Image (cartoon, rainbow, N blue to C red):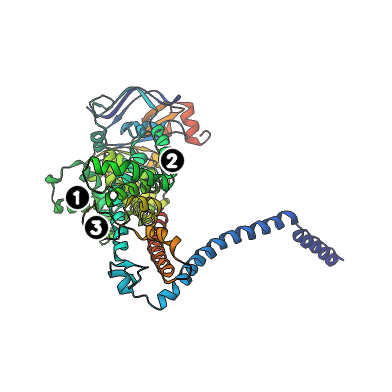
Amino acid sequence: MNFAIQAFELNLWYGTFHAITDLTIDIKKHQITSLIGPSGCGKSSFLKCLNRINERGGNVTVKGKLEVFGQDIYSSDISLESLRKEVGMVFQKPNPLPISIYENVIFGYKTHMPKSTYRKGDLDEKVESALRTVRLWDQLKDRLNDNALTLQLEMQQKLCLARLLPLKPKLILLDEPCSTLDTKGTLAVEELLLELKSSYSIVIVTHSMAQARRVSEDCIFMYLGTLVESGSTKQMFTLPKNKQTMNYIEGIMG
Amino acid sequence: MMGKVIEEEKRQLSDYIKHYRPKQILRDRIMESIIFLGGLSAVIFTIGIFLFVIKEAWPFLSSRFSLMEFLTNIEWYPVSNVSVRYGAKALFVGTAAVTIGSMVLAIPVGIGTAIFISEFCGPKFKEVAKILIELLASIPSVVWGFIAVMVMNPFIINVLHEPVGLNVFNASIILALMSIPMIVSIGEDALRSVPDTYREAAESLGATRLEVVIRVIIPAAKNGLIAAILLGVGRAVGETMAVLMATGHSVAIPDSIFSPVRTLTATVAAEMGEAPKGSEHYQTLFTIGLSLLLITFSINFISDILLRKSWKRK
C-alpha cells in the first residue's frame, strides 16, 4: 500500500458550520504533500482531523472515512494517545512547553514509554539525535536545561519538530509552520523537511505558493471546504486543470 | 509679505493647539487627580495602620518588653496582681497549630478543586461550582463560629469521644473551610492563565489530560498556586471570630490535635475590651497585633512576588 492517508467522503462540522464537504483524497507515503487554499477553506481543519486534535474544542462532528496507514482513525477502538504517537504535529505558532529544552524533546517519549524500559543514557541519546537532526545540537548542547521559551522563534519551531522525532511518528503534520518565521528561518525549516521526508510522510498546510512549490511533490488545492484539484505540484503550478486553481496560484483569488 | 502670511498661519495653528477640546482635557485632569488621591490613600492607610499599631505598642516595646520572654515563655498573665507575665509562646503555638492543621486539609482540597474546575469539569458545572464557592467565601466568620460550637463540638464529643469539643481539630476544620474558597479561586485563576497552547501541544504529543496537568499545567502555574496557598495561610493566621469560638480559648501548648488552644487573634479580641487604654496590658495586646501584622504582611509580600513572577513569564 502506497498511501499514508486515504480520505473517503470526509465531512466535518463545527457545530452547524460545515467546514469540510465530501473530501476524497489519497496522500502518498514518504513524500511531502502540501495543502493550499485561501483562509477558511478547510485545509487546517483537514490536517487537524488526522491526529484528531480538533476534537479538543468539542462540538465537532465527523462523517465519512479517514484512514492513516490503512487504519481507520475514527473507529471506536483507536485511542487518541496512540494515534498522536504515530501522527505528530507542528503548529502554526511555535508552542514549546514551558519546561527545559531537554524535557521538551523527550516529553513525548517519556509519555509513551513505560519508565522501566529506558535508562537516563537512552534519553540523552534520543535528545542528542533529535536535536542533531534539526541542527540545533551544536547551538543548544550547553543549555539543555534552559527553559525552551527563552529560545528565539526559529529555534522554538525546530524544537517543536525535534520533539516528535524520538517517538518515530509515521506521519508529520505541519500547520503553516513558517508563518511566524523570517525568510532565513523558513528556508532552514524547509531544508529540514526535505531531509526528513525519506523517513517520514509529511503533510504541510501553507499559505505560501512559493513554499508549496519548493518543498512538496504533491499539492492539494481546497476551496470552501471542498477539494478543487490535487496532483503533482509541478503539474499544478504549470498547467492547472481547474480555473479556480489557476486564479489562486496566480494571485487573482484568495 | 510671504513671511507675514506664514507667521499668521503659525499663530493660528498654535492657538488651535492651545484651545483644542479644553473641557475634555480639564475633565481628564480632574479625574486623574481624583484617581491619584484614591491610590495614594491606600498607601497612606497602610503605612498609617502600621505606625498606629507601633505607636500604641511602643511604651511597652521600649521598656518592659523582652523578645525572649514574649516568644519563649508560655505564661500569659497580663493582669496578675502578684507578677505580670507576658509570655506569648502558647499563643504563637496555638496560631501555628490551627494554621497548619487547617492547611493540611485546605491545600489538597483547595488545589484539587481548582484543578478540577479549571481542567476537568464541563462548562456548566464550572459555573455552578464557582458560584457556590464564592458563596462559601461570603459566609460571615461568626456563622462559622456557630457551626464550630453547635455542630462540630457535639460531633467531636459524641462521635469521636473526645472530652473537649472545642480544640485544634475543630478550629482547623472551620478554618480550612474558610480558606478553601480563597485557595480555589486564586488557584483557578493561576491555572486558567496557563495558555491553552501548552495543553494543545502536550495533547498533540499523546499525553492524557492527567499527564498534561501533572507535567505541564502545574509546573507552569506553580508560582500562582503557591501564592494561592500562602493567601490561604494568611487568611487562617488572621482569622479571629471563628477561632475564638472554636479553639476552646485555653492558653496551653497542645499535646494532641484534640487539645484546646488559644490564638494570637483571639487573645486580642477577647482581652481588648477589658484592657484600659494606655495600660501595659493594652500595649501588650498591640504588640501581639504588631506580630500578626508582620506575619500576614510577609506572607502577602511573598505571595505577591510569586504572583508577579508567574505573570511576567506570559
Residue wearing tag 1: A126
Classify the position of the N terminus of chain B by image quarter: bottom right
Q: Is residue A207 left or right of residue A65?
A: right
Which of the labelled discs sits on residue A224, or is there none? none
Quadrant of the rendered structure where residue A195 is? top left
- Residue at disc 2, secondary structure: helix
Q: Nearer the viewer, mark 3 or mark 2?
A: 3
Whether labels 1 and 2 share one chain: no
What is the three-letter code of the residue carrying label 3? Pro
Which of the labelled discs sits on residue B135, or is there none? 2
Separation of residues labelled 3 and 2 (CA atoms): 33 Å
What is the three-letter code of the residue carrying label 2? Leu
- Residue at disc 1, secondary structure: helix
Of the two numbered discs 3 and 2 on the same chain, state the one appearing first in sequence: 2
Residue wearing tag 3: B254
**Which residue is most to the front?**
B81
What is the three-letter code of the residue carrying label 1? Lys
Q: Nearer the viewer, mark 1 or mark 2?
A: 2
The x and y percentages for residue B3 are: 83, 67
